[in-house]
Image (cartoon, coloured by chain):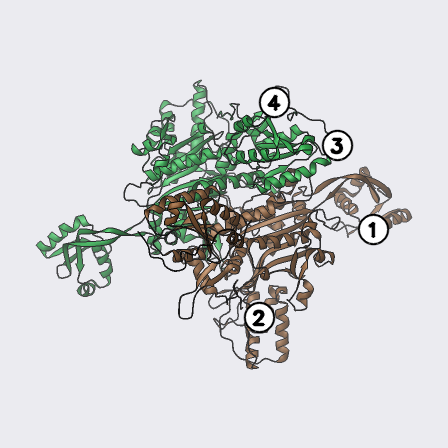
Chain colours: A green, B brown
Amino acid sequence: MATTTLKGQPFDRQAMDSMLRRRMFYTPSFEIYGGVAGLYDYGPPGCALLTNIMDIWRKHFVLEEDMLEVDCPALTPEVVLKTSGHVEKFADWMCKDPKNGDIIRADHFVEEILESRLKGDKEARGVKVVEKEDDPKKKKKKVKGAIEAVKLDDAVVQEYEEILAKIDNYDGEELGALIKKYEMKNPATGVEPLPPVAFNLMFQTAIGPSGNLQGYLRPETAQGQFLNFAKLLDFNQQQMPFASASVGKSYRNEISPRAGLLRVREFLMAEIEHYVDPDGGKKHARFDEVKDVELVLLNKETQLAGKTDVAKVAIGKAVADGTVDNETLGYFLARIHLFLEKLGVDQSKIRFRQHMANEMAHYAADCWDAELQTSYGWIECVGCADRSAYDLSVHAKKTGAPLMVRERLDVPVTIEEWQIDLDKKKFGPFFKKDGKTVEAAIEALPQDKREAFAQDLAADGKITIDVEGVGNGKVEVTKDLIVIERRTRTENTREFTPNVIEPSFGIGRILYSLIEHNYWTRGGSEGGDEARGVLSFPPPVAPTKVLLVPLSSHESFKPLLKYMSLKLRGLGISSRVDDSSASIGKRYSRNDELGTPLGITIDFQSVKDKTYTLRDRDSTKQVRADEETILKAIKALVEGEKKWADVEKELPAFEGQETESPVREEN
Amino acid sequence: MATTTLKGQPFDRQAMDSMLRRRMFYTPSFEIYGGVAGLYDYGPPGCALLTNIMDIWRKHFVLEEDMLEVDCPALTPEVVLKTSGHVEKFADWMCKDPKNGDIIRADHFVEEILESRLKGDKEARGVKVVEKEDDPKKKKKKVKGAIEAVKLDDAVVQEYEEILAKIDNYDGEELGALIKKYEMKNPATGVEPLPPVAFNLMFQTAIGPSGNLQGYLRPETAQGQFLNFAKLLDFNQQQMPFASASVGKSYRNEISPRAGLLRVREFLMAEIEHYVDPDGGKKHARFDEVKDVELVLLNKETQLAGKTDVAKVAIGKAVADGTVDNETLGYFLARIHLFLEKLGVDQSKIRFRQHMANEMAHYAADCWDAELQTSYGWIECVGCADRSAYDLSVHAKKTGAPLMVRERLDVPVTIEEWQIDLDKKKFGPFFKKDGKTVEAAIEALPQDKREAFAQDLAADGKITIDVEGVGNGKVEVTKDLIVIERRTRTENTREFTPNVIEPSFGIGRILYSLIEHNYWTRGGSEGGDEARGVLSFPPPVAPTKVLLVPLSSHESFKPLLKYMSLKLRGLGISSRVDDSSASIGKRYSRNDELGTPLGITIDFQSVKDKTYTLRDRDSTKQVRADEETILKAIKALVEGEKKWADVEKELPAFEGQETESPVREEN
């Protein structure tokens, strides 16, 4: 897909990747041992970028709303993930190639074979083939093999297109049937792969020495938060609503990871679980503060209509017209948008895409992904789901723990309802071993059916109810055992299971997208200089804030370098000294690649009068002033209070010294 | 073991534990599912404490010395950990009880049985038995069973004591022999456990869908740093010495973890690998800055003499007299000490203990543990080892990667040596398939033996060398194939594998010890009030810095609460509002338990003139001043620039309002 850089240049992924490697933003893990797919190490600038992103995240979300942070282990016993549904459902379908043993993701295989045939058909029909977006969510393992220009029947084309439109809906058996029906062969071997089998994406391990306690590495940080709900509510002095938050590594054993940092097996997640009373439309007390924030919302209907082109809309309007389900969900969509903006993602490359019915878990009320556009296509970087009461309910049911809120009612509520009394003394002996089962079935009778039973009881002296597993499934209960009456009851408290709104951040994906959005090149003429990469991170995000360069390796500069390093450290501003023998221009270039926004040059004039030049990475413009003024300007820039344009207006420009080309060194 | 609190009170671990649970510093993971031994969740104050400790750590180590931080995955392929030696050696010996299937750590079992018999002997002899330190490093699984007062032969007592002194030296077979010989039975079942088997402490998992790539969860973060050495050196523009650093979770599948946070299966580590030229005595350029730092050093000799009582000594002296092997190691011991001091550990409860020969890996040159004294005994919290060139060498050898430094020599070096030339044209055809093996054996001939071979060659016209696997192991090489001569060679570069000094921090252990060191109780009379816990963390470490309490829930306080929250947030100071209906005294008590050092009370006077009282957690003294003055004082306290005593001197005391007992509320 054709992307452009910040400055509108054609985006060259290979050039950027090579720069990121060279500058050690990240690098394949265990590379000297050949590496392992889907595992990456972050080097020093990558780590600093991660730290800064997380720092901004904590301030923007956790501190801003007094969220309760918890830190839970990745090691998780099986029972927890069985209850949450992950053991059963967190799987992809995979096929094995019987010839070479290759393992292929079944849905991707079907998709790619059919797309390749459709392309071949278009070629055969003489239609120009335009490369589709290279979307890593969809294409993990490219099926190798050249496209053959074979014309298909119109009916077949239509069948293929229908299958592709529904590709996310097929289970393993159906995928297997499609492979058989359309005789799909692995181009690498020429044979049909074996039928799909489910492959659970969780890493399995045994906890403890006996090997009996089966465990998994968590696939998300959410479950640890849910399990602590009762304690967190207590910590919050029983006040609702509130949110918990967690930052930590999660693990997914991807079948064949590709696309660099975008699909990895171990990744940093930051998740928020905001607990809200489901009654009253899930309002949010601070919604007003964000209601005018404008988002690009790609809703279900638009997607179904095959469109992707949508205008910005204020979140207040989107909630009001029902596009976004409720205020709390809307509040977080806006907050996510503001967070991404703060990080410096390209505003023209963010959209919020609503999940289609088939993408969403059955319990979810609504779900939107914040997607960032990159050279790999639109990438899901933040998910924001309304998980309803599902998680808290299933864990409460399984463990009996009170994962709910008990609220004192200001005004007691009087409830009129059909109540059932059983004569326990007679009931038990009468039904013997089935007593408990029958009792449970009676108590489960819904209010709207109880009136009819009361009438039956009055008329016939008995009722007949369905009780699975007892006799023939029909059980008669006579009026000496049961009373059904309409009565009133007063409630002073109300119990409810909160609903959960979950903004979930894939930090590695955000980091990668942020890099792409801030990358551009400078210089580079045809046949001339090589283009030099620049990463225009906003100063608060940049790995290192200030580069300190002495004009040369002259001894007189050393005390000043040390002095300025200390001064900056005292202000909490990270700096780096480059006193290598490379030219000043080269040293600045190197740090443009690292995204260092500011540079201080120490020259002979500095030694005399403690004035310094301050250089802006993006414009390469320089100003000159005394130490105090320069440090003040740096602080304001790094804390995001000022822009370079402000500083440039306030301080005298400096043009005496060329930083973009080699300078003769004095020694 | 009898410990005392910060204020000299007898330490009550149960009371403290219960407070920590109630305030959610940490809590057993998956507790609603019954929990998993050795796994803990950190709650909000625990997370904040962790974050603050790590923030101070990063500033103290990483930023201070421009260390290169890397972040590597916990998932590690087997080959890496085979090379490092972990697959073979990172194991404990365990026994299974044939009757109940219990799994017991063999060394602990032998130790506890013998100790229990020795105690029984003492009782039988009428000697008062004093409980030994409850050291979690040693006793993980208490062998249940009452001590029987049985007198032993004097010779047996001596045998037992000798075994106990050497308990860390036995391998599985020897431990099994001891169990047999002394008929040690599991008190829980009355039977002898099965022979010990090695149990590797790493969690195993398969990476990828095929199940063929065996992997482990890393037991330390060090290996990821070593594998990146060449890239890091490059990033550092080939300059030596330098350090890398890593912060992340590591995993050890402990056989039966006890002792709370002190022995867990998943834990946060922070590790530094400082790479130093082994030539020149491993000097450190900044050693002078720390040479006067005084440490309690418990060296090998003192331990062998059975003593533990040692005086403080300046690190400069300890390095000079050889107690500590070298300056770089000494530099880091001092820096670790300063770091622990900054965190607020009790200065009387730190010591540095040198590893005994049998504790240390064979390749280690020297190793010291920073131990902190707690109610569980002396706990290893930071290890500081000189790992020599071991790690870089083994990975380089296995992979062929150049994990070494190539240094340009200012003055070329002339080396006189015995050189061997082979007549390759004749040599190959002569030895045929054995050619390469024989050639390698010749090239491996050490310098000190070559002269003799040269003489043999001159005298006999041939030499006989040992070549394993060729013929009978003796190979004759005649003078037409070989020349051995003394020649001179000039070297312009020097290649060496750096040595590694590794300070390695167990963050959870530091956190727990820090809590114990800062815990004390206030009030509590016999039969009267309950004693209330206080955690006197230094302000920079405390989870929350400021508590904001309105005098009552009166509406007029709300805008001020919000205003002050915002003000503090703007200063980067974390605060928490407690506007619950509890008395002011109770609200302060609650926050003394959380270790919140400062409190601002908002009262009716505040509404009138924007003056506030500021309360000190430790003395419960209060001062009163206007907003600006109060905020300035808070900032100085939180950043560690001032102590409460300074503030108390500068600002007027406030005694008008009792905060330690309930206050009638106005509403």
Residue A31 placed where, x, y %?
Answer: 60, 40
- Comparing B608 with A502, the one in front is B608
Q: Amino acid at mark 4?
A: Gly
Residue A102 placed where, x, y %?
Answer: 50, 39
Mark 1 or mark 2: name the one nearer the start of the chain. 2
Mark 4 or mark 3: name the one nearer the start of the chain. 4
Q: Amino acid at mark 2?
A: Ile
Eye-nearest disc, 4 or 3: 3
Distance between mark 1 and mark 3 Cα atoms: 46 Å
Q: Secondary structure at mark 3?
A: loop
Asked whether the residues under the numbered discs 2 and 3 touch, taking CB atoms below 8 Å apart as contact, a structural biologist would say no
Asked whether the residues under the numbered discs 1 and 3 touch, taking CB atoms below 8 Å apart as contact, a structural biologist would say no
Query: What count of labels does the image hold?
Result: 4
Q: Amino acid at mark 1?
A: Asp
Residue A101 placed where, x, y %?
Answer: 51, 40
Q: Which residue is mark 2?
A: B179
Eye-nearest disc, 1 or 4: 4
What is the chain letter for disc 3?
A
Pointer 2 and pointer 3 on the same chain: no
Kindly identify which numbered label has been placed on residue A524.
4
Q: Residue at x 48, y 46 (%)?
A: B629
Asked whether the residues under the numbered discs 1 and 4 touch, taking CB atoms below 8 Å apart as contact, a structural biologist would say no
Pointer 1 and pointer 2 on the same chain: yes
Residue that protrudes farthest toward the right in the picture: B459
Asked whether the residues under the numbered discs 1 and 2 touch, taking CB atoms below 8 Å apart as contact, a structural biologist would say no
Q: Which residue is mark 1?
A: B448
